[in-house]
Amino acid sequence: MTPGGTALVVVAELRAVPGQEDRLRTALEAMIEPSLDEPGCLAYQPYTDPNDPSRMLVVEEWTGQDALDEHFTTPHFRHVEQVLASILAEPVTIRRLAEIWVEPPPTEVTG
């Protein structure tokens, strides 16, 4: 992305109640395909912490805030929201990230 670009990276951190890790993993996996089918979704990938299987992250990239807002209204998001209410040990932490843009060094012209 270039300076002033509109892509939005979101990291959601979730922690399952002990014994609900598989259910959380299944719920997050079920979100991949329908989320990627949304027009504003550029990436959607869940991860698990190998040292703590109750802790999972979802790294998402959206074309902008409008696309993310639309995602929150979809039937698959509403469904997973209901599932998560019964299996999370704590509220979801959501971080919106902005890319750090570094100007590339000037190209040396030889002649």
Image: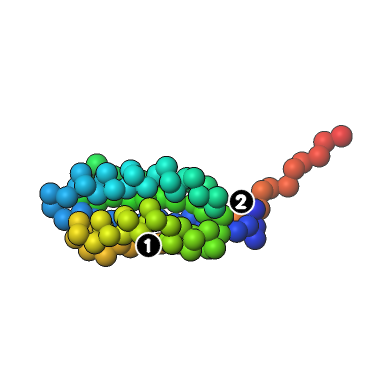
Q: Tell me where residue 3 sits by quadrant.
A: bottom right
Q: Tell me where residue 82 sits by quadrant.
A: bottom left
Q: Which of marks 1 and 2 is nearer the N terminus?
A: 2
Front position in the image: 104 or 34: 34
Residue furthest left in the image? 19
Tell me the element at label 1: strand
- For residue 92, side relative to residue 67 (left or right): left
Give the labeled residue for mark 1. 94
Tell me what residue is drawn at x 41 percent, y 50 percent: 59
Q: Kindly identify the amino acid type of the residue bearing the numbered disc 2.
A: Met
Q: Where is residue 30 in the image (x, y as percent from the top left)?
A: 34, 44
Q: Kindly identify the amino acid type of the residue bearing the numbered disc 1.
A: Ile
Give the labeled residue for mark 2. 1
Residue 13 showing in the rendered view: no
> Counting other residues with Cα less than 10 Å from the Cα at mark 2, is it few (<14), some (14-19), or many (20 or more)?
few
Give the Cα separation between the discs numbered 1 and 2.
21 Å
Q: Where is residue 12 in the image (x, y as percent from the top left)?
A: 36, 57
Tell me what residue is drawn at x 13 percent, y 52 percent: 18
Tell me the element at label 2: loop
